[in-house]
Image: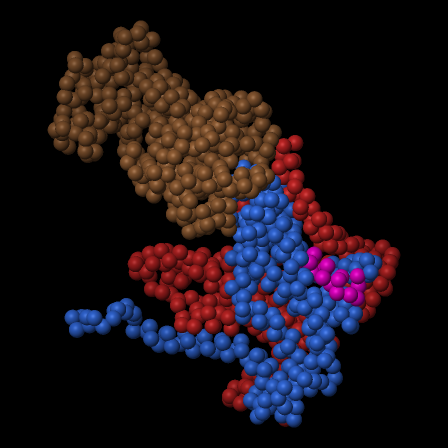
Chain colours: A brown, B blue, C red
Amino acid sequence: MNAPLPGTRPQAANIPLQRARPEATGIRLEQVSKRFRGGVLAVDRVDLDVRPGEFVVLVGPSGCGKSTLLRMIAGLEAVSGGRIWLGDQDVTSRLPQERDVAMVFQSYALYPRMTVRRNLGFGLRMRHTGRPERNRRVAEVAEVLGLEHLLDRRPAALSGGQRQRVAMGRAIVREPKAFLMDEPLSNLDAKLRVSMRAQLSRLHQRLGTTTVYVTHDQVEAMTLGQRVAVLRDGVLQQCDTPQHLFRHPVNLFVAAFIGSPSMNFVAASVSGGAAHFADLRVPLPAGSSLATADRQVILGIRPTGFGVAESNGWPTLRAVPDVVEELGDERNLIIDINAPRVDTDATRAAVAARTADDALLLPEEKARFTVRVPGDHPVSIGEPLDLAVNPERLYFFDPETGQTLR
Amino acid sequence: MTTRTATGPVRIESRWARPLQVGRYLLLFAFACFFLMPVYVLVVTALKDPVQVSVSRMWELPQSLSLNGFREVWPKLRPGLVNSVLLAVPVSIISSVLGAANGFVLSKWRFPGADIVFPLILFGMFIPYQAILIPMVRTMRDLGMQGGLDGLILVHVIYGLPITTLIFRSYFAGISDELIDAAKVDGAGMLRTLAYVALPIAPPAFAVAMIWQFTSSWNDFLFGVMLTSKENWPVTVALNNIAGGQQVPFHEVMASGLLACLPTLLVYVVLGRFFMRGLMAGALKG
Amino acid sequence: MRQIRQWGPGLLLVAPSLIVLGIFVYGFMGWTANLSFTSARGRNLTGDYVGFDNYRELADERGVTGQRFGIDTQNVLIFTAVFVAGSLIAGLVMALLLDRGVRGESFFRSVFIFPMAISFIAIAIVWRWLLSNGTGTQLTGLNKLFSASGLGFLANDWFKSDSGWAIAAVALPAGWALSGYVMALFLAGIRGVPDDLREAARVDGAREPQVLWHVVRPMLLPVTMSALVILAHISLKTFDLIYAMDLKSLKIDTPALFMWFTTFEGGFYGRGAAIAMLLLAGVAVVIIPYIWYSVRAERRS
């Protein structure tokens, strides 16, 4: 992370910005809804409180309403219901130009006929900031982002990464109450994306500006967000720290969406203080509310919730790897489980939002597990091995509602 | 095969490729001759000496080049040419500016009902002008704008609005919505978004719209003949008058025809690319 | 409220244009329609309400007016058929000839399209000479060319012919003016077919004519419709060209000219308005579905 980043100038990036904002502004959404013409409900009564200086990521599959929500905060989209507060001001009915927020767009949206300098200064110019002040701030931001040598170029003469930085710079120069970012890294190649992610984190630490960041990529969400808000079909599912989201998903969708590779699911039954699936009996964790229950559940296990070398007295599952994916340090095994597969809207929606290689997770008939094992553990395709299931790392979901059962 | 190495690219073609190619060029040349035939007649006759001009020898090349025709016809055509310049230049500028504003609003700053308004505007582009001619002439007379060029300019600007609006609307539709959003978030209202963000990227659309309007107002006949008095005739009306007169020698007619066409042809030759785009826009979709 | 502040300025900016167009297009069309139900004569446009009398008169083949209008309608239909079919075919052939990388393509393209930049008046002046029907020592124009190249049997009286098809000769200059445009439309359409698609067909074993027929042709339908509609509405409206070719000849008279003469030479404003409305109806039948279709196609994409 601290190695020099490609395309950036680390020595410049280390100069601190002189004037971080003295006090940051929070954003509060109260029951915000958006119904498009034609009746589609894109955002459904979302409550969200972004604390001053916080970095919150909105994540979800495409069409979940995250971009619409962001655009409503910017004022680019009118709200159909609810209120939006910027600090202690109700900005619900203000036009974008009357809200003091800055936005970074997926396509960067740099003004093609303006030089980088004029692009950076445009927002200040529109807000009638005097020329000397404008030039000073543009120069300052250009230095921080390592853009000084590009100031007189037009956007067409810049690389993707440089354009991305100009787009960032255009937001930073304004010193707005909040940054709104709409998938700002998705047009970069994978390597640059990782480096920009780190830069962005550092920038936020330095500036302390309240930021709302939209992405469909849960890895990006987890690595960037102080808190991550997961949306599905316009409804806010859960907003929490990445750790808490990973450990305590409130429902099947969040559980399936967060974490890579995805959580494994299998239909199971609970009775007598244990869960049963595929001829296996796993005792419930201590204090589980299901201890006395007798019912059907969906059981979830993270790929990392298995032990291969040691069994610790856990119940073991004999399985035959179908596919082995080498990751170097680790391996992903894909195994068939002798139990019906789980196919609910929630798992399907979560999987559809993921990368294509995760599609293997939902084969036709039987359940399939992905299991992550250490790279030094010998496995080969077709060779049976014993997998110990860690009872402490099981998740239970209601098959009807998808809610987590604790 | 082994003997064919290093003799350039190996062509994959059938036995008939060569004769077909020859036939293709022959046909193309035939078409080109058809299109250039009137130009040949026009130029050749215009350059002929009066004594050489006769109907039966129209295809023959001039024995000596003579600018007599041009000299004779220049005084008669000059006022028309001047009027047409005074007409076409303001028309192309005013229509384009209005079209830019309309096109911007209809594509990037839309209001409820814009989807209904636009087809209604478009229809104005296709109507036969006979259907509005009587009230239009009457209105222009009542406004005291019949006879002069100002009325003709006004009418061309108005009936040019649909096409220029269409040209700019299509052009602006091609730029990203995020660009407009960025300007809004940066604090620009509609006029400043138009002025600072949209217009600076619109020169190609201006070229298309201006050329279209220049050409169509230059070539218009119907409005010109209805709305202007003799001293304000545009060149098409003047040309028709010269050509329709009794006993006007052919070389003079052809010389005036050539002169009347030169400005638009010049525009076509120099800015053909934009001219073509206008034609495509006129078909609603390219 | 916020909504109005958002789009209000836009509406304000286009409002002048909308109002002016509303008056000059729709208001004037309404006025003309209204006028067509009166016996208005003279420039004051006053007359009694006569209902459909003007239309009835135009339809009545026994009267002089009806007779002429009948001929005009027939003329404009013949003209449209010949002109549209001819331009479409010529345009398509030219586009196909140019499609696959011809040396000097831009030269040919320019030559085919330049007539679009020329006024119909100038076109008519040259072509009425080229289509002259003089004989003997007066033999000239295309006829002279034909006889000189041994194609004398092709010579004819063109638009001065006595046959009802005289107007078809006017389709020649009209097609000369517009088939290059059609060529451009077709060329754009053909080139709009993705190369992958054509290559896939070639790899699948299709020969070039088969590629054109099975792959390119189905995708040209929208372009063909566009060209058809544009040409048809132009042909209904054609005025200058015929006016300058021979304005006094009944053989190449059309409703567009008849309206002009009746109204502004004859002073029958009511009747002229009726012809204008029929002309408008003819154009509207072609154009309104076209606009509707285009707008819808755009909204879908």
Q: Which residues are magenta?
A: B145-160
Residue B38 horizontal/vertical position (percent): 58, 79
Based on the picture, tell me whether residue B159 belongs to the magenta stretch: yes
Picture quadrant of residue A282? top left
Task: Tell me how many marks there are.
Answer: 0
Residue placed at 51% from the left, 57% from the top?
A: B286
C120 and A109: which one is in front? Answer: A109
Residue B42 visible somewhere in the drawing? yes
Residue B170 visible somewhere in the drawing? no
A27 and C298: which one is in front? Answer: A27
Based on the picture, tell me whether residue A307 belongs to the magenta stretch: no
A250 and C285: which one is in front? Answer: A250
Residue placed at 16% from the left, 13% from the top?
A: A313
| Magenta-drawn stretch, dominant element (helix, strand or loop) | helix
Picture quadrant of residue C255? bottom right
Q: Image height check: is C128 above or below A15?
A: below
Residue A95 horizontal/vertical position (percent): 59, 34
Q: Image height check: is A124 above or below C21?
A: above
Residue placed at 21% from the left, 21% from the top?
A: A306
C68 and A297: which one is in front? Answer: A297
Residue placed at 67% from the left, 76% from the top?
A: C245
Q: Image height check: is B157 above or below C4?
A: below
Residue C1 horizontal/vertical position (percent): 65, 31
